[in-house]
Image (cartoon, rainbow, N blue to C red):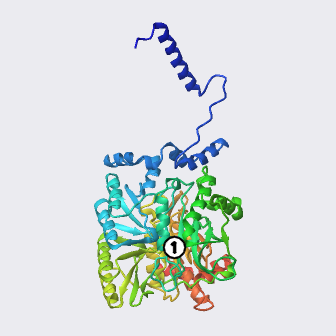
């Protein structure tokens, strides 16, 4: 082949320059602009939603910009490189690494926290012991049980981040999607499969949905975090009413227009930190349909959730703006069919709850076997305790560890002949299988010890409140005290009989503040769902134990009888009246406390 002539070379050079110029301005001079390529692949649904915001003149929030610039799952090699170098993450990577379950919690702790994903909160004894080993090798030598029946490992130095994540996979666990704008740990009935009252075992449903999410990248990167729970009708509350999506097992009677049998009732829009609980949609689906229904609900949220304002980026706000009918019509369009509906009269009443069933010894449906609930003070365990508890589960039970939303766990499959041995071995670890009313219902988030958002040390003050009250009052009724550090409300303070949320309380005239709490009363859950009302604002933390005591003393003096709960008693009174009743005693309690 002969070389090009000088004239041919000049022509080709000019042509190439022209092509480059056209590409630089985006098209042929005088021609219509080239159409923007349609996004494809698993991230397309999110990119299109972001594009609609931009096209309408909106401004994406920082987190949406970070997701758009680099998907967190595409950045794992950078995570490992930063970890190997002992490097703390920049703000955008601090957000991205949460997709892998890692939360940089500085300045409170100069380290990561890792949150796992454990469907239905149930894991094997050897996995539980394996988490303890990982917490020793890479963390602070302890773990927390969370309010989503999950585990957290804390005090993870940067260089230990990747080895920890990979170590979790080695023992059959994962932290993928445990934080940021993703679907959090899937909760279900902790007594699933062993509860004589339940009408459906939630373990297969939680597991199926867990893997549905893990294997579909399009379900990561939502407008904001998302919670899903399954209630099988057992005696331990799951708190599905606080979730974005709740599936409740119901038995449908003949004559409803659909086939009688066990169905899942759909409730939507729970977000207790924003003072809202999930509402019944009137829709029921077969248990086998839960994945498809939840998937469609999520995709409507992905396409229409707020990507400009993080405070309004939960599904509740789409429901508020659209109404349930419009939202459910969009879900049915995604599914390509109408969903089944049933009138409440055709659903059999749910069985009762037992607010003490997560602590102590309880008969299983299987003859001769028991579950035993172990009290973990505000969810904290040392790794030595974890390994010993795993041995007990293996040697005396069926080998399962069942975490609960009450920050404790259950042994299951314990034969009658082994019950006393389990109780003794648990006691030898400094733990207990029994609890006072205050201890059984005490819930607290991480607080200022390990969370930069918290305004107070929640776990420490929660324990101080329980110790103070237990030393002064004998309560025979369940009492739930929920202590949370900030408005994210990880401890769900609005649903407690008494709820506390961290606050900075001004002292003096020079702008100084001290730790304190706002106190709410009258919240409820399960068969009595309610959002609590504010009773006192800006109470110094040191005064809170006596304030809680004063509420409970006023309750004991004024209740209509033992059958009236603390929450029900508070709801009978206007807030000013409640204040008067409690403050009549507060002075004496505060004086005694000092």
Position of residue 466 in the picture relative to residue 266 (left or right): left
Secondary structure of residue under mark 1:
strand
> x, y percentage for residue 50?
59, 46
Quarter of the image where one finds residue 272? bottom right
Q: Residue furthest top?
A: 6
> x, y percentage for residue 45?
57, 50
Quarter of the image where one finds residue 258? bottom right
Residues 142 and 438: in front is: 142
Residues 115 and 336: in front is: 336
Quadrant placement of the N terminus:
top left
Residues 237 and 561: in front is: 237
Q: Is residue 277 visible?
A: no
Residues 507 and 277: in front is: 277
Residue drawn at point x = 41 percent, y = 85 percent: 360
Above or below residue 460? Residue 364 is below
Give the labeled residue for mark 1.
Answer: 482
> x, y percentage for residue 231?
54, 75
Q: Is residue 357 visible?
A: yes
Residue drawn at point x = 34 percent, y = 86 percent: 423
**Badge 1: residue crowd in 10 Å (few <14, some 14–19, many ≥20):** many
> x, y percentage for residue 468?
45, 80
């Amino acid at each position: 082949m002969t070389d090009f002539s000088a004239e041919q070379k000049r022509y080709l050079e000019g042509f190439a320059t022209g092509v480059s110029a056209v590409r630089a301005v985006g098209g042929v001079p005088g021609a219509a602009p080239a159409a923007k390529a349609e996004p494809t692949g698993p991230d397309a649904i999110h990119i299109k939603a972001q594009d609609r915001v931009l096209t309408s003149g909106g401004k994406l929030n920082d987190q949406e910009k970070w997701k758009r610039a680099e998907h967190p799952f595409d950045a794992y090699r950078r995570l490992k490189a930063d970890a190997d170098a002992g490097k703390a993450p920049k703000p955008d990577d601090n957000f991205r690494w949460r997709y892998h379950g890692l939360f940089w919690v500085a300045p409170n702790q100069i380290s990561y926290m890792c949150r796992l994903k454990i469907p239905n909160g149930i894991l094997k004894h050897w996995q539980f012991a394996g988490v303890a080993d990982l917490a020793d090798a890479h963390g602070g030598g302890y773990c927390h049980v969370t309010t989503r029946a999950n585990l957290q490992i804390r005090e993870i130095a940067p260089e230990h981040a990747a080895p920890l994540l990979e170590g979790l996979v080695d023992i059959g666990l994962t932290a993928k999607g445990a934080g940021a704008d993703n679907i959090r740990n899937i909760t279900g009935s902790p007594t699933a499969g062993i509860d004589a009252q339940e009408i459906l075992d939630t373990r297969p449903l939680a597991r199926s949905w867990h893997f549905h999410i893990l294997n579909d990248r399009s379900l990561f990167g939502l407008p904001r975090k998302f919670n899903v729970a399954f209630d099988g009708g057992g005696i331990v509350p799951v708190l599905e009413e606080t979730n974005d999506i709740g599936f409740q097992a119901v038995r449908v009677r003949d004559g409803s227009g659909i086939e009688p049998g066990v169905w899942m009732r759909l409730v939507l829009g729970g977000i207790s930190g924003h003072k809202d609980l999930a509402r019944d949609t009137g829709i029921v689906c077969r248990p086998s349909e839960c994945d498809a229904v939840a998937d469609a609900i999520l995709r409507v949220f992905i396409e229409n959730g707020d990507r400009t304002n993080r405070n309004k980026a939960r599904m509740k706000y789409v429901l508020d703006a659209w109404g349930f009918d419009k939202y459910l019509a969009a879900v049915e369009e995604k599914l390509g069919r109408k969903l089944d509906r049933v009138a409440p009269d055709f659903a059999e009443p749910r069985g009762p709850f037992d607010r003490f069933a997560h602590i102590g010894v309880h008969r299983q449906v299987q003859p001769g076997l028991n579950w035993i609930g172990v009290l973990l003070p505000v969810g904290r365990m040392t790794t030595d305790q974890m390994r010993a508890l795993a041995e007990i589960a293996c040697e005396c039970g069926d080998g399962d560890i069942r975490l609960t939303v009450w920050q404790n766990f259950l042994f299951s499959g314990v034969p009658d002949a082994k019950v006393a041995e389990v109780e003794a071995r648990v006691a030898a670890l400094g733990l207990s299988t029994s609890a006072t009313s205050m201890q059984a219902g005490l819930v607290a988030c991480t607080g200022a010890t390990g969370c930069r958002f918290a305004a107070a040390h929640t776990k420490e003050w929660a324990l101080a409140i329980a110790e103070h009250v237990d030393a002064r009052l004998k309560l025979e009724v369940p009492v739930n005290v929920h202590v949370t550090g900030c408005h994210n409300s990880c401890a769900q303070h609005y649903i407690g009989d008494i709820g506390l949320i961290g606050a900075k309380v001004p002292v003096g005239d020079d702008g100084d503040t001290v730790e304190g709490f706002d106190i709410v009363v009258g919240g409820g859950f399960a068969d009595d769902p309610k959002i609590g009302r504010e009773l006192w604002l800006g109470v110094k933390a040191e005064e809170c134990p006596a304030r809680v005591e004063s509420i409970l003393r006023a309750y004991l003096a004024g209740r209509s009888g033992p059958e009236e709960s603390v929450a029900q008693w508070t709801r009978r009174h206007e807030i000013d009246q409640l204040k008067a009743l409690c403050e009549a005693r507060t002075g004496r309690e505060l004086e005694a406390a000092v």
